[in-house]
Amino acid sequence: MTDIIKLLPDHVANQIAAGEVVQRPASVVKELMENAIDAGATTVKLIVKDGGKALIQVVDDGMGMSETDARLSFERHATSKISSAQDLFNLHTKGFRGEALASIAAIAHVDMQTRTETNEVGVHIKIEGSKIVSQEVVATPQGTSISVKNLFFNIPARRNFLKSNQVELRHITDEFHRVALVHPNIEFHFYNNGSEIFNLPKGKPRQRIAHIFGSRMENRLVPVSEETEVVKISGFICKPEFAKKSRGEQFFFANDRFIKSPYLHHAVVAAFEGLIKPDTYPGYFIYLEVDPSSIDINIHPTKTEVKFDDENTLYAILRSTIKHSLGQFNVAPVLDFDHNPNLDTPYAYKEKGAILPKVTVDATFNPFQERERKSGGGFQRTSSKGWENLYEGLDQEVDTDNFSSVAIESDSDAQGTLYDDGVGEHMATTFQLRRKFVVSTVKSGMLVIHQNRAHERILFEKFLGEITVKEGVSQQLLFPLELTFNPQELGILREIKDSLTNIGFAFESLEEETVKLTGVPLMVPESGIGTVLDRLIADYAEGFNEGTVSQAEVLAKVLSKNLAVKTGELLDQESQLALVNNLFACKEPTLSPFQKLTYTIISEGDIDKKFS
Ligand code: ADP
Ligand code: MG
């Protein structure tokens, strides 16, 4: 038998490597920006078109390359950054593999212009699918400009796998943030489809964060700082009251590299324990400096996971540093509300039986206040006073004896078959069990409704209807509400603007960082609009990443999740009844929008068995 093993030609090897290094346009952005920084640039420009599918260009004013280096830079394992294995343990650059340019050139059309300080003229090289198609002398400023066009032109499967321009742009923006946050002393510009979406002048880390995430961020930040033998920690945490429902403003950097670390994240969250609600995440920007030899970043070219030598110690130090900052800067419970009972009792107590009222933004709105229903199964919000009164004297257990029986008017078929109208029992009673379930009787036995899930279902169908038939009812605001968003959030807002308008939001302008709202849906409390929109934007972005295709559905899910009555909220008699009625008026009453059971029926037989 003849020998069959062959060495792969370089362009094939490069294409295979590219599959690892370049997963999407954002990967190219990351590699090019890191190269610019390694080259000592003081100003870096990122230019993107159509989510990076049409163009990604990075222009820097760094050291540039000689003609030979420029050609060599596209070879695999060609790097100026390390020369021996030993160097791997003392890395001070972002790149070291020498794979990025070779990989990118294998799967795209690349155009590079570069000049060093000492050379009078620069070099202009064009490469398509690893082949140099032209090389010329060119007059160009010192530094390097690399444009990448037609990404994945020779791998259609990859190209088709790319998401919408907006989603790709979001990934690019994430990478841009990660790089820009580590280098506040470098000026960055980011142009998308011809307009500048970020202009980040040199400044202090705090200013950089504010430039990226909006000026409102500035006074939310609390500095963190600690220096030990193992690690030097610096950066900021966000005050607990600004903890968000979404992940997103959580950043760890180790030796100037963005890293992900669920373990260290846990350390931060642990430090916030008792100060934030259980399903929210604190924002943080934490920079760790460790001995380069104690950290292994060599796991995978695109992975952000790292391995620290002594993770446990790091965890402990980080946690206590943050606790210290929270204490030192007196970030004690100061909330918008006069008094937030959530902060009085550590959350762990919740499990021990005392049911904590949840005063979230939703608290001021009572979707069940008025029984007369609006079109599409919606509720009309009237005064929020009664709802707030519910929170008086919350330490006492609910006094179920006081609940009076209220008749259920069976006005739909669903209810007709459901409710017991046989044995002279035209009166049905509902009561709330542990502020979690609403219990009632039906023909076959006992109906137990999960209040949160049921309300999610009701709201989901309502919003889905409104988005598609545009019938949402808006309440005009007497004084327009001004809210600030960062550019990325603004992008999402613009994306979903039409749907939001359909359900009753009215925006005056969506061009600037500050957005003017002139109207909001009837059922969203004015005081909580900012929070609702924040969550909406974050959840919306996540919803799409999870692969839901219809915008209307994502939005309806997000809204229902955020506005539904929560477990732990007290419902008055009317609200309980409305919940029952409206649930069974739904098209799909059995499941929440998140595919969880909304109610169950415990039959008479089941109960009989208990007594046998
Ligand atoms: P790595 O960054 O891992 O060394 P790359 O493939 O990203 O590998 O780059 C290869 C080499 O090309 C780098 O080591 C560097 O010498 C050179 N290079 C790449 N981009 C630039 C740039 N913007 N300015 C100067 N030199 C660059
Ligand atoms: Mg590199």
Image (cartoon, rainbow, N blue to C red):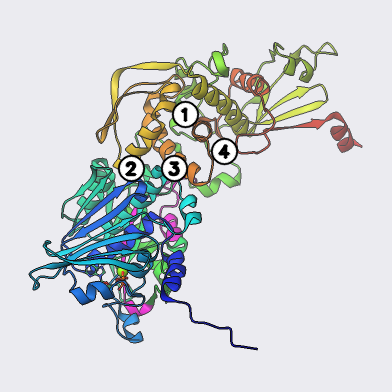
Residue corresponding to mark 2: 488
Q: Quadrant of ligand 1?
A: bottom left
> Mark 4 highlights which residue?
355
Which residue occupies the foreground of this view, 134 or 310?
134
Asked if disc 3 and disc 1 are in contact, CB closer than 8 Å, the reply is no
**x and y percent of residue 36 in the render?**
23, 64
Mark 4 or mark 3, which has the lower sequence index? Answer: 4
Provide the secondary structure element on which disc 2 rests.
helix
Range covered by the magenta-colored residues:
265-294
**Residue 609 as seen in the image, left or right of residue 152:** right
The picture places residue 43, in percent across and down from the top left corner, at 16, 58
**Amino acid under disc 1:** Ala
Q: Amino acid at mark 4?
A: Ile
Residue corresponding to mark 1: 363
Identify which residue, 426 or 418, lies in the foreground: 418
Whole-Å distance between the Cαs marked 3 and 1?
A: 25 Å
In the image: residue 516, left or right of residue 401? left
Q: Residues within 10 Å of mark 1 (few under 14, many from 20)?
A: many
Nearer the observer, disc 4 or disc 1?
Answer: 1
> In this picture, is 129 found above or below 455?
below
Say the numbered circle drawn on residue 478.
Answer: none
Q: Measuring from the top left, give residue 264's x and y in whole percent.
A: 43, 63
Mark nearest the camera among 4 and 2 is 2
Calculate the distance from the C-alpha at mark 4 to the C-alpha at mark 2: 38 Å
